[in-house]
Amino acid sequence: MWLPTHGPAAEFAARYLDIHRAFYDRTLTRDRLDDWRERQLRTVLDQVADGSPFYARHLKDVDLTAVTHKDLTSLPFTTKADLRTQMLDVLSRPLADAVFFYETTGTTGPATPCPRDEREAIASNAHVTESWASIFRHHFGDHAPRIGLMGPTEVHSFGDTLGDIARNVGSMNAKIWPYSPVIGFAKALQLMRDLELEVICCTPGVALTLAKGAEHHGYDLRRDFSVKLLLVTGEMCTPALAHNLESVWGAEVYNILYGSQEAFVIATACRNKRMHLSQTNYLIEVVDPDTGASHGPRGSGELTVTMLVDGVKPLIRYRTGDAVTIEESDCGCEMPGDLVRLVGRTLDRLHLGGEQFTAGQIETAVMTDVTGSAGYQVVIESDADGRDRLTVRLELLGALVENPDVIAQGVRDRAAAALGVPVTVELSDGLDPIVSTGAFVSWKAARIVDRRTEPDHETQVAQKMAVNRGYGR
């Protein structure tokens, strides 16, 4: 792992990696972890109050000396709207202190600046390195696999971060973003074949579109490629969708990490395909998405994080907008940290037949036991009596599916039973290109056509993106 050799970042790295190693060696005591959290929280609070114009205003009525790492409830939340309106005023160190500058995609509002310095890169990358090293040992032993990194934009941290992780674990990596005008799907597939890439890291949607592209260009996914692992991130991927991806590629699928441009890597996967929180980097709260009441560090609700790394843009009680369940780990793998399960964005909750469902519940209802699929989309309508009904559009890869009608009947029966509304299944030769925009806008905009209401802003953005950029073609 690359480390700074002098200055404040080097001093931080020495202190941080000492705690980090103890965390992964399982020698970090509760008292020592509490001391680290309290000291870092105090450092971060002092820094943002003095250095960030936004937080100087946001926290001016709070007695920061009374705040402890065990009780953050006197602090106000930071929201995505705050980041979009305050922009560089959220920074608490000079922009020149950053070593990377990234932005959010800006598809649903102003692109939010997301600079990061050496402290933030070291702390975030350390957990991903542990995750990849463990998974690669499990699958490849001492062999360092060849990795293909795919996406998503030039101002996203994906390529830099995962390129560094690949270097940390001793692997060659090729950055082959298939939606790039320089690469394209034909070139990406050719490089995957010729370089004998064994690990592909991309979104679930890109993995499905790659499979469609391979079929179109005459490749056999198992004969012509060497892919053993798909490491997916950037979109929700339920176990049901992961199982389908495995059936398509003949490779193991890992939902490899959970995080964001704004908050970095919050959790990483273990060899058992479960996600563990990076608990040396964050104070975690689960809050009621409607009332904001804190349930503490475990439970079900909206994930809220307070950063413990005093970089250029630490966030205080940042509401991620993601619905999660957090539990004490019973995993038995090499990875420490509580377990987190992502069930979708709070904004992606839907009402069907008088009941509320998360994105994860809907995807699970549709994709359970489905194999050989290149994607799905759900259309919601009301019948003449005002009752909800669903149409599931399902695209199947002909070379992998012998009995499409059997699969369709299974989806119809299981989805109707799980969601409590009538379900029709349409087998499609090609879904609306909007389905491929998920990582750029939202799962809901990409996967759901809700004809009960007018298209919301995110859906309109996704529609324009699908047409203007040619996604899915």
Image: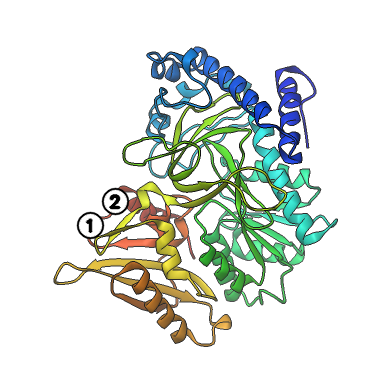
- Can you say whether 43 is above or below 448 in the image? above
Q: Is residue 319 above or below residue 313?
A: below
Using a 10 Å C-alpha cutoff, classify the residue at mark 2 as few (fewer than 14 neighbours), some (14 to 19) or many (20 or more): few
Residue under the point 64% across and 45% down: 159
Position in image of residue 264 (x %, y %): 57, 38
Nearer to the camera, 326 or 322: 326
Q: Which mark is residue 456?
A: 2
Query: Which residue sits at x=32%, y=62%?
Result: 449
Residue type, label 1:
Thr
| Residue located 38% across and 28% down the image | 85
Q: Which mark is residue 453?
A: 1
Q: Quadrant of residue 376?
A: bottom left
Secondary structure found at label 1? loop
Residue 409's image quarter?
bottom left
As measured in the structure, the alpha-carbon distance from the residue carrying label 2 to the one carrying label 1 is 8 Å
Residue in the foreground of this view, choosing between 245 and 195: 245
Label pair 2/1, CB-CB below 8 angstroms: yes
Q: Secondary structure at mark 2?
A: loop
- Residue under the point 67% across and 68% down: 251
**Picture coordinates of residue 397, whole percent (x, y):** 53, 78
Q: How many marks?
A: 2
**The residue under label 2 is which amino acid type?**
Asp
Residue 434 visible, this orientation: no
Crowding at dot 1, Cα within 10 Å, few <14 / some 14-19 / many 20+, comes out as: few
**Residue 162 place in picture, x, y as percent:** 67, 46
Q: Is residue 19 above or below residue 59?
A: below
